Image: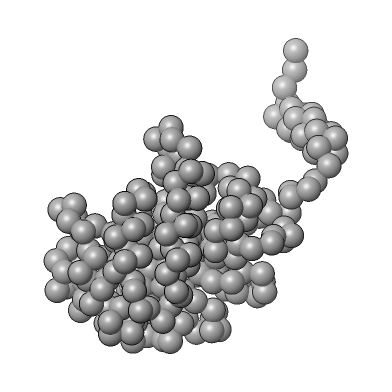
Amino acid sequence: MANLKHVEIYADGADFENIVLLSAIPEISGFTTNPTLMHHSGVSDYEAFARKVIQNIGTRPISFEIFAEDHIGMIRQAHHISSWAPNVFVKVPVIDTWGQSTSPVVKHLTAEGIQVNVTAVMTVSQVEQATAALEGTRGAVVSVFAGRIADTGRDPIPIMASALDVTSAQRNVSLLWASPREILNVRQADDLGVDIITLSYEMLSKLSLFEKPLEQYSLETVRMFHRDAQAAGLTL
């Protein structure tokens, strides 16, 4: 694992076998998943999958997401999910499918002592609204999708820096760098002082490249090209 000063690494995914493997790594501080990842992994029984995962990760935090569209349904699902274990955080999208703020839901759940992970956040204004709704929380996360921000051609660093100023002023609220696109984002998040970054199984495997001598990496790359050309039977 990389030598990091501040940021904690959470594994993001819905492949049960990979989750079990990663649970054996002490440097993995927590886990996250979402309905899209579950769909891609073929998960059809949400609760059965979640309970099996919980049994295999110990007491480390894990976030499971609600998917109801109406706010009453969101609260009902959040209560059910939070009952699965003390280390469960309930992911609540920052807005509903009609584009309306879910701050009333977040505020309601926070008042009831439920640990919330406000997700799909992309603007500083959304960070401010979410953080305000989390006042008094015993533990919460605000997940800013820095990778998706970058996908639009915007530099996510200024947004993440501003987001950190907001969340760090609220007790027990952690800022999470979500959807990283390259392993450099781990170093960027750490340098900023972001609390958490999520990494996929594929991204986690790249942590071993940190501080690798570039001359050595260049040689390994050239040898890979040569080896693959021979394996493909290429001739000129």
Q: Quadrant of residue 50?
A: bottom left
**In this rendering, would 58 be left or right of 80?**
right
Residue 47 in sight in this render: no
Screen quadrant of the N terminus: bottom right
Q: Residue at x 54, y 71 (%)?
A: 30
Q: Quadrant of residue 151?
A: top left
Instruction: Tally the marks.
Output: 0
**In this rendering, would 27 be left or right of 88?**
right
In the depicted structure, whether residue 193 falls above or below residue 135: above
**In this rendering, would 236 be left or right of 98?**
right
Q: Residue at x 23, y 77 (%)?
A: 108
State the image coordinates of residue 207 (x, y, percent, origin top left).
Answer: 68, 54
State the image coordinates of residue 152 (x, y, percent, origin top left).
Answer: 39, 35
Q: How is the image coloured?
A: one colour
Q: Residue at x 61, y 69 (%)?
A: 28
Observer-nearest of 61 and 124: 124
In the depicted structure, whether residue 160 falls above or below residue 85: above
Observer-nearest of 63 and 111: 111
Residue 149 in sight in this render: yes
